[in-house]
Image (spheres, helix red, strand yellow):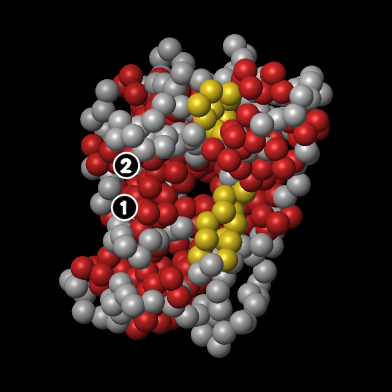
Amino acid sequence: MRPSGQIRPTYADSFRCIGSECEDTCCQGWSVPIDRKTFEKYQNLPDVPLRALIQSSIVAQPADADGSEPAPFAKILMTPANQCPLFNGDGLCRVQIECGESFLSHACAVYPRVINTIDGAPDKALSLSCPEAARLVLLNPHLLPEKQPEEQPEATASSHADGLPANRPLAHFWPIRASVLSLLRQRTYPLWQRLFLLGIFCRRLDAIARGELDRPVSDFLHDFDRTVATGALLPAMETLPVDRSAQLDVVLRLAGMLLHRSNIRPRFIECIQAFTSGIGNGPQATLESLSDHYAEAHDRHYAPFFARHPYILENYLINTIFRTHFPFGRSGAQPSNTPDMTREFALLTAQFALMKGLLIGVAGHHRTNFSAAHVVHTLQAASKHFEHHPEFLNQAHALLLESHMDGARGLAILLRNTDPIGVSRSPVPQVQVPVQHAGSAA
């Protein structure tokens, strides 16, 4: 049953930075943006000891080609070790210590919180690129309360969509969010089936928005929720394909995209080394041999762990839903824009397939010692490399198109790792891809 009211996350309010105890500080590994207001505040600093260092460490960005203000307005010049020069030897920020929190840039003050505004109120999620945020999100068995505050008798439309035609899904923002979250927590279905159903959900909403499906959005949501709740769709999804070689090939290519970046952090390299070890990578490896090791790692180590801790990956997806305004996307959540929910689902699947694939390999490496700490380490390190990579998701979507994995069948292949019920495992088929892809993430 779909909960009523406006479902807003509250867990981000519990986040507290652990400062010098953090194992992967946010003060290194990427550029730090400075907004105009903070930049001007730094220009007017009193004669404090830190003034010269601050002013010499921050450079304004050139205006855009059309003369408009650049985004970000300025950046901190990182040290040769790619560390913020305002970072002291104790792992703390000198600006905050010597000038106070009010002198932090907006990005530094808010991170790792991701704050969107819906109906005039903040909607907060967390970036899992922060280790403490990753622990807070992933390891909480009750990330969302079982009962949401019932401020309204029914989940209602978003007021920022007032005036939109009834067939515009954005006019039903809150009921759609409620249906998505209800589906993700419906454990009658294995997680891969819940995600596959989410893809159907997004395609149907797009069809309604385009006028190809003549149904009121509210009626569709009611019928979808009711059908999911009965479990009637379980048998039909058992016929969906399993192709571990094709799945693994996409995972390797996605990981390769991240490794081609110039700034690869040691924590992510550790994850990749564990992943490639866990799938049997080596000089004689072929895609077929890697796929066999990948399937074994899934069945013997990954699947048993997540059967005991099903909330971890659910929490990862729930946080992503809030962080990205899924299924609308941040751009599509604006009343003046038209969301492409099918594309947003493909992007969500690409992210999940990458994370799941890395975790399968890491589980294969650690075997019976595979633990929640390895999950946090893997998801945090990978998130730090793609959540803040402006082109990664576009590149990932292009890869799905190139690999013909963007349709329902391809996305099912990325999601599913288990054999149909009652079917024994057959030899892994060799797919027609160059063998060098198997080593691209080594």
- Residue 261 position within the rendered picture, expressed as x and y whole percent measured from the top left: 44, 22
Name the amino acid type tagged 1: Arg
Left or right placement of residue 105 versus residue 340 in this view: right
Closest to the observer: 227 or 390? 390
- Residue 229 position within the rendered picture, expressed as x and y whole percent measured from the top left: 47, 77
Left or right placement of residue 282 versus residue 395 in this view: right
Q: Residue at x 54, y 38 (%)?
A: 36
Q: Residue at x 42, y 35 (%)?
A: 70
Mark 2 sits on what residue? 397
Name the amino acid type tagged 2: His
Q: Residue at x 32, y 75 (%)?
A: 164
Q: Quadrant of residue 274?
A: top right
Mark 1 sits on what residue? 343
In the image, residue 133 above or below residue 214: above
In the image, residue 89 above or below residue 312: above
Categorize mark 2 by other alpha carbons within 10 Å: few (<14), some (14-19), many (20+): many
Closest to the observer: 331 or 49? 49
Left or right placement of residue 124 versus residue 193 in this view: right
- Residue 215 position within the rendered picture, expressed as x and y whole percent measured from the top left: 26, 80
